[in-house]
Each structure stands twice: as C-alpha cells, then as structure tokens.
Image: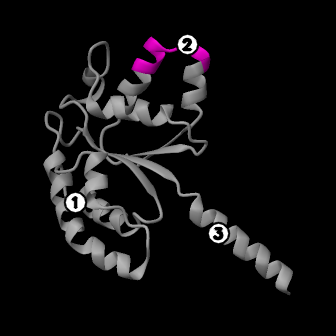
Amino acid sequence: LLFPLSILAAGSTLRAVEKPRLIVLTDMGADPDDQQSLVRLLLYANQIDIEGLVATTSCWQQHAIRPDFIAKILDAYEKVQPNLLQHEAGYPTAGALRAVMKSGLPRYGMTGVGEGLDSAGSDWIIQRLDQDDPRPLWISVWGGANTLAQALHKLRATRPAAEVDRLVAKLRVYTIS
C-alpha cells in the first residue's frame, strides 16, 4: 500500500512543478466576458505561468485595444494577492503580471498582419517561443488572433523553415471564437 501512495505523491509533485505556459490574447473592453475571464484566471495564477496578457482587437472592437482594462484588473489583483497567498503559495505579484502585459495593433483582422506591422504583443510571442523551455506555449485567444498571426508571419519571413517548424510545434492555440 505504501508503494502506490508514494507513486501518487511523486506524480502530484511533478504536476505541481510543471505549470503550463500561457499567453492570453484579449479584446478586453469589447464586452464584459474577458474582464470576468481574467479575474477568474488570476484566481488560478499560482498554477499557471502567465507569460503574456496581450490587448487585441476583434470583430467586436475593430479599431481599439484596451490595455487599460487589463491594468485596472491587475490593480485590483494587487490588493487581494496577499490574501490569496495566505491560502496557497505561488501567486505572482501584480508587478510581474504588468511586466508581461503587451499590446497588439489597433487594427482588425489581416489588416494588422504583414511587413512592418509588428507590435509589442507579436514580438513578445516570438520572444516567449524563443525561450529555452521544453513546455508547450499555450495561446488562449479570447479576442482577435491577428497578433499571433503577425508573430507567425514575422517568423516565416525572418527564420529558416526548420526553425519555424520547431517553434510552431511548441504552440498550442485555443480560441473561443
């Protein structure tokens, strides 16, 4: 009986250490669902390596990005983070989350993809893909996907095909649209 329990305990420890990597693309401000989703995500921020919070456009918000909405939620998180830490360790500081807050271009769809259309958000995706980390990089698309499309466009334009294939193989993309 002791042996199977030790295997279960070891497996639990490995899963706890192996946090998934996540970048969120959000059209925050278009409607309240993304604000609600970010609040919910922050409740689990100790179990996920949040590597990016990127303000994007979408079909509901075609000509604006609202990083200020992300910042406002991070301000509120900063107030409750010490309380969260009383219940479980590992919640990142609001400052650490602000450091990974980026913006896409305030352009809709493929009008935001092409030569010279890089953004802090698309460059950040590439930077995170370039990290020497064997874990997949999850991209959760709550809003528009053109920031990810621009990152892929730039990779294809600037890197050898084998390297692009290696980096793309690290991506796991989940879109709610």
Residue type for callout 2: Pro
Residue type for callout 1: Leu
Q: Nearer the viewer, residue 63 or 12?
A: 12
**3 or 1: mark nearer the eye:** 3
Q: In the rendered structure, are the residues bearing label 2 and label 1 in contact, judged by CB atoms less than 8 Å apart?
A: no
Question: Spatial distance from mark 3 to mark 1, Cα to Cα?
Answer: 29 Å
In this rendering, position of residue 5 left or right of residue 94: right
Residue type for callout 3: Thr
Which quadrant of the structure image shows residue 87? bottom left
In this rendering, position of residue 78 left or right of residue 93: left
Task: Tell me the residue at 64%/69% (across/down).
Answer: 13
Q: Is residue 100 above or below residue 105?
A: below
Mark number displayed over residue 28: none
Q: Position of residue 145 (x, y in %)?
A: 35, 36
Between disc 2 and disc 3, whose residue precedes?
Answer: 3
**2 or 3: mark nearer the eye:** 3
Q: In the rendered structure, are the residues bearing label 3 and label 1 in contact, judged by CB atoms less than 8 Å apart?
A: no
Q: Which residue is mark 1?
A: 74
Q: Position of residue 63 (x, y in %)?
A: 14, 33
Question: Spatial distance from mark 2 to mark 1, Cα to Cα?
Answer: 38 Å
Q: Nearer the viewer, residue 171 or 64?
A: 171
The secondary element bearing badge 3 is classed as helix
Q: Which residue is mark 2?
A: 160
User: Magenta span covers which residues?
Assistant: 154-162
Q: In the rendered structure, are the residues bearing label 2 and label 3 in contact, judged by CB atoms less than 8 Å apart?
A: no
